[in-house]
Image (cartoon, grey):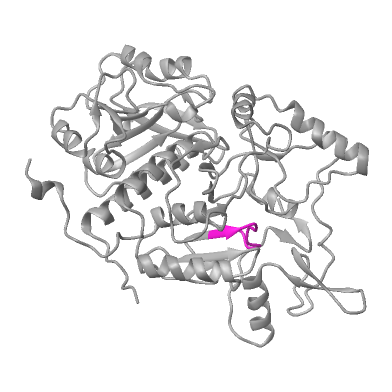
Amino acid sequence: MLTTPVQSPEEAAGNATFDALLWALSRPGMARTLPEPSDSPIIDALIDRECKVHCNDPLLVPQILRSGANQIDIVGADHVFLAVLDDIAALDDVAKGSDLYPDDGATVVLQVTLDRGPRVQLSGPGVDGTLALRIGGLPAGFWQRRAALSRYPMGFDLFLRDGAQVVGIPRSTKVEVL
Amino acid sequence: MSLKSLTKPWQPMSYGFLDASAKRELRRKMLKSVAVPGCQMPYASREVPMARGWGTGGLQVSLTLLNPQLRVKVIDQGADDSVNAASIRRFLALVSGAPVTLDTLGADLIQSRHRIPEEIMREDQILVLQVPNPEPLRSVQPNMSIARQMHADADYGRMWLQLYEQIVRSGRVMQGAGYPSLVNGRHVMTPSPIPRWDVPKLNMAKHLTILSAGREKRIFAVPPYTRVKPLVFDDVPYRVEDHGGLTCSRSTAKGFFMNEIPQVDGSSTYEVSDSSYGVKTIQKRDGDAVQFGETWYNDGEMTQ
């Protein structure tokens, strides 16, 4: 008879991180908590040698190298980790997928300040009616540029992280700046 | 980088059966499928100790989500006690140590074949549906490359034509299970072979639904609060099965989806398809303290 395997700490962290990410993306605008306040649990949960990653945070680079992922330029990357986003022109290069394969659109992880900054209103799948929240730390014109670049079902999906809190904004969400 | 940092201690089996890289791939695809509701995402369906077509897609999703705190319920055509449901439930518990339940209210994760429970699911629950054929266009376009192009173009004319032809030939839509439905106003999906009775439950539901086809290697999802509209013509309303007036012969539950049981004399009796709901109704009749949740249908009528 088989014995039940025991969940290792890494496995438990990966599972908890994915649970937070899945629910963050399913309920856009509602913050979930990651096991630790950094991008590294996200990398552990999602990234391996099948991924093409762009990361401009030098502190995360060793971990991405260890995962075996290809480190490439922002063009063509399927996961993009931006510790600082000064210029919204970077969004133009993020992979948006195609109508045939919307899943080729990138997952973009950004650092923001939640509960401060401009108010935005979300609507779309996962939002019960509308939801307003404050998202700070993004360059001016970010949401307008995102809307201009996304032609559903093409687009990219955002995870906005503030400490251990993460908010998901999938491409299906309509974001209005209030 | 040392050899030690690249290896992990020996284990007889990975937690939750799937290895870490299989889980990461499923996680990435599940996130994408939530981001584009109803759109079929290809994924590398792994081998699991079960034949393809017996719920391997749903099983892989459940194995990825499992942890020792997640309470699991498995249903097969509404029943918790059929062979498929019982063996999947036992396997999930064996490889993860997750607690199991038969009660819809007590479950965190519900893996289901061809039914959605009668009690309304909560915002924190996940429904995993096993899908035999994920492509709603297959009956009108057997070439899957062309079908993908049709999804990309939102070209669903043939789907409408098929429904129209059924109405012309038979006077009504003959599609019994897996009724094609438009998700978020963009992608037509098959809601897996759930009866027409269950399709309205997905519209603006509170729970997250993940549909996974292991044999066909596709995964798609319906996030909470997402529009799911069965394809219907303006002048031919959507009709669910006429089960609203039926009473369960064993539990006396009334107004739910029923299994028809043919009798020797040619007549039929009925029993409620959601076995856990039937059992709870019997327990209540026997005077046990049981908790019922709100149901999607009341007296055979959809409540919303």
The image quarter containing residue B148 is: top right
| For residue A120, side relative to residue A58 (left or right) | right
Query: Nearest the camera: A163 or B260?
Result: B260
Estimate the x, y position of residue B3 in percent, counting from the top left: 9, 47
Residue B163 vs A83, above or below: the answer is below
The image quarter containing residue A157 is: top left
| For residue B243, side relative to residue B191 (left or right) | right
Asked if residue A178 can be seen in this view, the reply is no
Decide whether residue B116 is among the magenta residues: yes
Q: Which residues are magenta?
A: B111-120
Main SS, magenta region, reads: loop
| For residue B265, side relative to residue A30 (left or right) | right
Q: How many marks?
A: 0
Residue plotted at (54% across, 33% down): A124
Query: Nearest the camera: B11 or B192?
Result: B11
Query: Nearest the camera: A108 or A78?
Result: A78
Residue plotted at (52% across, 58% down): B51
Query: Nearest the camera: B180 or A136?
Result: B180
